[in-house]
Amino acid sequence: MHDGCINKQISIDTMNDPLFPNKEARIQFLSAYKKLLLSVDDTYTKKEFLHLKSMLKKAVLNGDYSDNELGVHPIVKNIYAALVISTEVGLKRASVISVLLYDLVGNNRVHRHEIERYFGQDVVVIIKGLLKINELYAKNPVVDSENFKQLLLVFAEDVRVILIIIAERLNVLRLLRRVKNDELRMKAGNEALFLYAPLAHKLGLYAIKSELEDTALKYTDRIVYNTIARKLNETKKSRDEYIASFIGPVEDKLKKAGLHFDIKGRTKSIFSIWNKIKKQQTEFENIYDLFAIRVILDTNPEKEKAECWQVYSIITDMYQPNPKRLKDWLSIPKSNGYESLHITVMGPDGRWVEVQIRSKRMDEIAERGFAAHWKYKGVKSESGLDEWLMNIRAILEHPDSTPTEIMNDFKLDLYEEEIFVFTPKGDLHKLPQGATVLDFAYAIHTDVGNRCVGGKINGKNVPIKYLLKTGDQVTISTSPGQSPKRDWLNIAVTSKARVKIKQALKEQELKESEYGKELLFRRFKNKKIDFDEAAVMRLIKKMGYKTVTDFYYDLASGKKDPNNVIEQYLDLEKKDKEQHDMAEQRPAESFTASQPERVKSHDDDTLIIDENLKGLDFRLAKCCSPIYGDEIFGFVSSHGGIKIHRKDCKNAPQLISRFEYRVVKAKWTGKAETRYPVTLHVVGYDDIGIVTNISSIISKEKDISLRSIDVNSSVGLFQGDITVFISDTSKLNGLINKIKTVKGVKLVERTSLR
């Protein structure tokens, strides 16, 4: 028996399972579940179905699902989402299973190894991406600049995760219709308009994109939505009559030509009408292109383009075309796979009418995007989508872009229409509308962009800010002496070009800042003044700089006078000394003599060697710098003395394996009263306050003192070594944890430096 038939039978059996104590939830579940089974009927095996059914049933009976604000049982919500994914996006087996099970994996009700064993690695990969998205929403339920970058990172890993999340967002918007929670609706609507509708547009999911936009407008501006909806309803009769008068003669001509087709009129979405009203700054009554006529041909792939042009010829013979409004996406499809021929003709009563001509295959791709490509071509991705995902990765890999910059640059690329330009050899490049010669140069190669001085369009010299048009043949002119300028950011519109320009400007700035630091250091040396890094950091912060790089850049460019900086440095030192002297002038009865630093005393920290020996002469190995509390061992050197090493010393494996006979046991006992020098390696973002904050933490710690600090910055990061005197490992671990809390610190680790 075919698995599909078995699954249909099982779906009927499932209806008798008392999974839900709530009757309404049970009815919702059974209705949605039956539709889902029919939609994915032949994409999984009987064994897979039984495992899936068992996991879901067990989770429901155990009460493993948490309540939500959407008014439906969580498993029903997931099945509704799976239905969108299966029937409206076109993804099947792996994606549907992932949506039904990922929250159970996230709650540790189902283990990942079970998922892999029963359903394969493909499902595990998708679930991993969905769980990452869930974690982001748990930390911050609003898509803002802080978690936008992480969202894109997850999206860039697997395109199916993007498609599933878009489908889930649509499902949530639909479910919110039955919920009386305006705040929740407003948040979901803004989020859909901000990110998910543009993503759906980019991926060619036009039907979903329109519903996301319309529903979001309904939630965020109910008055506008209702006004346009009411006016559309009022004009529906006259609009239907006009569409019929236009379509009738066209149908007759197409039938006489022997073509098989479907023809219909389609009203534009409420959101797109609202956009036209805003863009044209006009009233609803002045918007004439409220609908489009769509001709969908039922033909073989090898004939579809020819028949589309045949329909074009028939319609333009009947109605006067507007040549400026011809859009040919048959010859060169959009990067999201969209193929269609758009024409605008003068219909009855002198009204302009848009006509879209496409095949059934093209129409399905237009409605369902890349998932439909997989159906027709049997591949997992398309070149246009791959290029887009590579562009996302390039943006995210640039270390100096802030989340807000990424968000702004990325959003520019989402809704833009495309132009098509050519190299002198005839290679095609797709760029967003509004792209310049400079954008094209960066599209060719980063080095070409960085050296661009202009270009030639169809043989004519043009500047780098020239706006490209479809059909242009572009040649880039470069010069070895050219380098990116800050005003280029006002010329470039593509995210790739803008990221590369910012990167080049940052590198130039860093080179200049290195020179500025060297310049200041030499002036200090010439005046025989000690260069105290921590004091300089305090001065830079006092001057109001946000980063050390900015300060040194101003020195290099002449905006700051090094001599003036040194004067301010000496004034700061003088004030610090005066404050210190005042602190020393206090009543005798409150005075406590400071104790000299005690680095090591064998009598204080009793160390037992070889089980029971005390008082032996030993030295602490410099390769690992052990302190009280470390797990240690002794090593008898060739000179007869004993060196104490940490058990995790990098040299320990070699010493123990090669000279086992010279290794002796050792452990600390008594109290930790000696203070040892320990060096911490700290890495963080290049922020002026970071060193001051770390120094402040150390100064507040009892029995811990700062011995030295040596830091430097490069490529937006600072790193340095901080040496402190400290008594034992418990205090050391506490200090490390406190330093990790300083804003901007990314890494703190103990080193072996002394």
Image (spheres, rainbow, N blue to C red):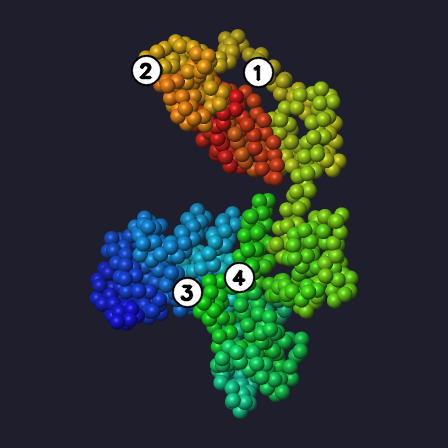
Which picture quadrant has residue 21?
bottom left
In this rendering, position of residue 467 left or right of residue 650: right
Tell me if residue 523 comes above or below residue 616 in the rendering. Answer: below
> Is residue 23 visible in this depiction of the protein?
yes
Q: Nearer the viewer, mark 1 or mark 4?
A: 4
User: SS at mark 3?
Assistant: loop
Q: Residue furthest right?
A: 461
Kind of residue indicated by mark 4: Leu
| Labelled pair 2, 3 in contact (Cβ < 8 Å) | no
User: SS at mark 2?
Assistant: loop
Query: What residue is pinned by disc 1?
Result: 583
In this rendering, position of residue 186 left or right of residue 570: left
Mark 1 or 4, nearer chain start: 4
Query: What residue is pinned by disc 3?
Result: 91
Mark 3 or 4, nearer chain start: 3
User: SS at mark 4?
Assistant: helix
Q: Nearer the viewer, mark 2 or mark 3?
A: 2
Mark 3 or 1, nearer chain start: 3
Where is residue 475 shown, x and y percent of the image? 72, 61
Query: What residue is pinned by disc 4?
Result: 385
Q: Nearer the viewer, residue 440 or 553?
A: 440
In this rendering, position of residue 153 left or right of residue 345: left
> Is residue 469 visible in this depiction of the protein?
no
- Number of labels in the image equals 4
Mark 2 or 3, nearer chain start: 3
CA distance separating discs 1 and 2: 49 Å
Q: Which mark is residue 612?
A: none
Kind of residue indicated by mark 2: Glu
Query: What residue is pinned by disc 2?
Result: 611
Mark 2 or 4, nearer chain start: 4
